[in-house]
Amino acid sequence: MTKYSLAVDIGASSGRLILGHIEDGKLQLNEIHRFENNIVKKNEHFCWDIETLFSEIKIGIKKCNDLNIKPDSIGIDTWAVDFVLLDEHNNLLTDAVAYRDPRTDGMMEEVFTIIPKEKLYFETGIQFQKFNTIYQLFALKQKSPDVLKKAKSFLMIPEYLNFLLTGKKANEYTNATSTQLVNAFTKQWDHELLDKLGINTEMFHEILPPKTVLGTLTEELVSEFGFDMKVVLPATHDTGSAVISVPELEDTIYLSSGTWSLIGVENRFPICVPKALQYNFTNEGGIDYRYRFLKNIMGLWMIQEVKRNYHDEISFAEFVELAQQEGDFQSIVNVDDDRFLKPENMVSEIQKYCKETNQQVPQTPGQIAKCVYDSLADSYKRAISEIEEIFEKSFPRVNVIGGGCQNEMLNQLLANVTNKEVCAGPVEATAIGNIVAQLMALDEVEEIHQARALIKDSFEVKSYKQQYVKG
Ligand code: ADP
Ligand code: LRH
């Protein structure tokens, strides 16, 4: 009997439920439901609307009935680092505060006065981003120590959604590593770090690896949906799921391109060397304890915000077309500057940056978009040369995955500035990685290398080569 796995993949900009099964040796996808995800203001903080996200998941599950398919399993992945805390009655003690909230401003520096930066890096292998969970928890400790003391349960976003589905509470390895509180070598919560920071260690659960069957649906949900299914842990960190889907990793740098651009390579061990610290590369935990050695680049968040500033009247595809008509426009911003993390208005912030740096100020939507794409390509190029310096080798290929790989202009720009082959696809890499982890838990696919071979056989990638060199 064919087995069906349902991936719930929620990125910072949108969520989707995609059903996957194997047919004639290929992985087939069927998009069941898609919805927007937005940051909302709640109790003076930028938050995720977790109740709405859960109701969208339920809408999607119910839509399976329209197709007459009862999935065998479901797995949830979302963006990393964010969490909620529960009390002893499993009630929420906190909102799902979003990582772009300024509550972590200055927290990283305060943490360094307690734990030296180098120690933190060499133990966890995780890059310094002011929004990592460690700094969010420290901010909470400063502002609401009672809440932190009272907490009996620390659940990251997919884990809380899993709790709503199953009633079971557990932490999952790939997402746990993004907290900067997991030891890169023992793969467990680092109690020494937690104790030093005075963070209540009782609230953390056992860390379970991807492919674990967490349980089944609660009785209430079974009667609501009319069927039960297994709830499986994929790599619940979306980037962890996405990187599973890179069809060919040999000699390849991947670029997971969505709200964030995550650029790096996969390893069998963490690389916590001084150069990696200097360039701020991370070693996030992956499936089968592989490590994603990568760097976060501000990503298509910039164009998402620009789109919002133009009242969503221009589509992503139209921004690409408009930028293509601005061939001669050449101003570049440093996309990794924190000023672009959550500016009041992205368009004005880009314009201000160009003015301050004596560059031509972009005026039209096409010029703004061209500036964003050129600036991203510039940052990708820098990160690639840092990877090549650390690995002391050259990588001939970059494989772009995720929604952003549909941006043909950016793919071509990347090929032009790096003189590397740029492969694009699959678009739904994250959902695909989520599905194959479930299929492995259901014994439909044996191991990760079979999963990758299946993905390679099932999805086309498009190749771009350098067309011209500027200057
Ligand atoms: P996330 O999961 O991080 O929210 P996605 O992987 O869904 O992000 O990617 C979203 C991004 O994909 C958008 O910000 C947009 O820039 C890009 N994108 C989506 N559709 C298109 C398109 N038709 N042309 C160009 N870019 C696109
Ligand atoms: C991408 C992502 C990334 C994290 C960021 C918070 O969606 O999960 O890997 O660093 O969001």
Image (tube, helix red, strand yellow):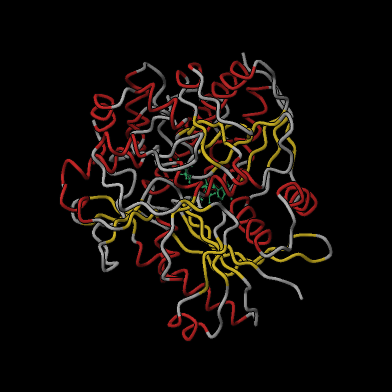
Query: From the viewer's perspective, is 464 left or right of 120?
Result: right
Q: Can residue 366 be seen in this view?
A: yes
Left or right relative to 2: residue 186? left
Identify the residue shown where x is 57% and y is 59%: 212
Residue 92 in which image quadrant = bottom left
Q: Quadrant of residue 341?
A: top left
Residue 439 place in picture, x, y as percent: 68, 61
The one nearer the camera, 337 or 287, is 287
Q: Is residue 359 above or below residue 350?
A: above
Task: Using the image as rendered, state which of residue 169 and residue 318 is in the foreground.
Answer: 169
Position of the N terminus, as image quadrant, is bottom right
Is 55 in front, or is 375? 55
Q: Can residue 102 be seen at all in this image of the molecule? A: no
Measured as percent of width and height from the top left, residue 172 is found at 48, 52
* Looking at the image, residue 208 lies above or below residue 410: below
Residue found 65% across the figure and 61% down from its top: 441
Give the mark count: 0
Of the pair 185 and 349, the residue shown nearer to us? 185
Identify the residue at horizontal 58%, vertical 49% (top origin): 241
| The C terminus: image quadrant | top right
Q: Where is residue 182 in the image (x, y as percent from the top left)?
A: 43, 39
Q: Where is 333 relative to 90, above or below? A: above
Q: In this view, does 294 lie to the left or right of 193?
A: right
- Residue 459: where, in percent of width, then height? 75, 52
Q: Residue furthest top?
A: 471
